[in-house]
Image (cartoon, rainbow, N blue to C red):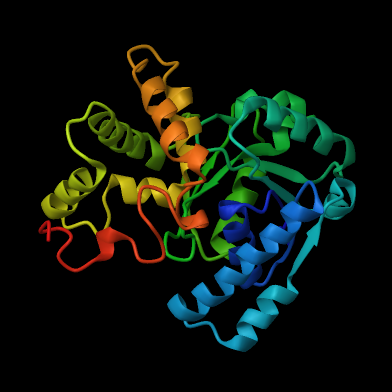
């Protein structure tokens, strides 16, 4: 089956990016959100990708118009998925929220529709049964800034139909991405498994008072030549996501100290509406963060 019509469930930072990239590639996309306010916020995010694609991908106004013509918005789940070939879930990284969504989705989606979770911390076998179609369910994980970071990790579970898996791989290629095919389930895929150690170590250095976050970023940037350090990366990921990741990781043996990290992120940042790039403030202030300042790496 060629995937032609896609539903993105959740029009947040990642959901709106995924939707825009799919529409930009010529497919039809519906962004589903639970209420009009969330849907309106998704439209505002999509408008920022208009400008980004024109600036960074040199998309013409005509291409941007065509892209937006391929996008629609819905707040009724049954209407949104009535003719969907693929539903990509991008709801919050909370097991109960995802379970509730899949229980509702299973009741209204056509039997032939493929379901994919974009979770970055969980595995598809956690939700396979509740989807009602384990053979047509897998994980499909994108990386922030999809127009630059062209990888999409595809991870099945033991019950995923190999034919469905390959259909999703073909879909990834069709939307201009590179499919990274995992051979078994792993909670953080490939990229995030490596990123987790990087970010959690930086956060522990910060929480333990070894150095302030700018010094930690500066050290990484100077030593590796990277354009960003770990705290700039955290702002890009979003600090609500970072909070959930650290809280979840703190339940693992030997990583209990990360609960302190999670609490500090919440108290000092999230509770002050410093959620990262999306809100204009996180560890850094946007749109002109200090780490982009000339002389930052040298401490000037």
- Residue that sits furthest to the front in the current view: 272
Q: Is residue 32 visible?
A: no
Residue drawn at 40 percent across, 39 percent down: 192
Q: Is residue 114 left or right of residue 156?
A: right
Q: Is residue 22 left or right of residue 32?
A: left
Quadrant in which the N terminus is drawn: bottom right
Q: Quadrant of residue 173?
A: bottom right
Q: Is residue 123 left or right of residue 229?
A: right
Q: Is residue 100 visible?
A: yes
Q: What is the number of callouts on the image?
A: 0
Residue drawn at 21 percent across, 30 percent down: 209
Q: Quadrant of residue 2?
A: bottom right
- Residue that sits furthest to the top in the current view: 253
Picture coordinates of residue 118, whole percent (x, y): 58, 43
Residue drawn at 26 percent across, 59 percent down: 291
Residue 126 vs 1, above or below: the answer is: above
Q: Quadrant of residue 201?
A: top left
Residue 286 vs 183, above or below: the answer is: below
Picture coordinates of residue 128, whole percent (x, y): 69, 28
Picture coordinates of residue 248, whole percent (x, y): 48, 24
Residue drawn at 78 percent across, 61 percent down: 73
Quadrant in which the C terminus is drawn: bottom left
């Amino acid at each position: 089956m060629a995937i032609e019509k896609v539903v993105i469930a959740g029009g947040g930072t990642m959901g709106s990016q995924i939707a825009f990239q799919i529409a930009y590639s010529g497919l039809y996309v519906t962004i589903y959100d639970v209420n009009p306010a969330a849907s309106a916020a998704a439209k505002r995010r999509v408008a920022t990708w208009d400008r980004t694609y024109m600036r960074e991908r040199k998309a013409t106004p005509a291409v941007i118009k065509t892209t937006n013509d391929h996008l629609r918005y819905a707040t009724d789940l049954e209407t949104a998925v009535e003719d969907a070939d693929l539903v990509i879930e991008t709801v919050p990284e909370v097991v109960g929220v995802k379970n509730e969504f899949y229980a509702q989705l299973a009741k209204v989606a056509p039997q032939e529709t493929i379901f994919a979770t974009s979770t970055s911390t969980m595995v598809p076998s956690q939700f396979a049964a509740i989807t009602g179609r384990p053979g047509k369910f897998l994980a499909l994980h994108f990386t922030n800034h999809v127009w630059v970071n062209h990888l999409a990790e595809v991870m099945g579970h033991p019950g995923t139909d190999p034919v469905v898996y390959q259909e999703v791989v073909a879909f990834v290629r069709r939307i201009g991405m590179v499919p990274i095919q995992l051979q078994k389930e792993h909670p953080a895929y490939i990229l995030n498994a490596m990123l987790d150690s990087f970010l959690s170590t930086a956060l522990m250095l910060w929480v333990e008072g070894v150095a302030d976050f700018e010094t930690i970023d500066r050290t990484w940037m100077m030593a590796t030549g990277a354009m960003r350090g770990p705290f700039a990366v955290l702002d890009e990921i979003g600090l609500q996501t970072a909070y959930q990741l650290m809280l979840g990781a703190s339940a693992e043996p030997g990583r209990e100290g990360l609960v302190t990290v999670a609490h500090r992120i919440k108290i000092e940042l999230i509770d002050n509406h410093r959620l990262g790039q999306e809100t204009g403030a996180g560890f850094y202030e946007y749109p002109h963060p200090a780490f982009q300042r000339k002389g930052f790496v040298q401490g000037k």
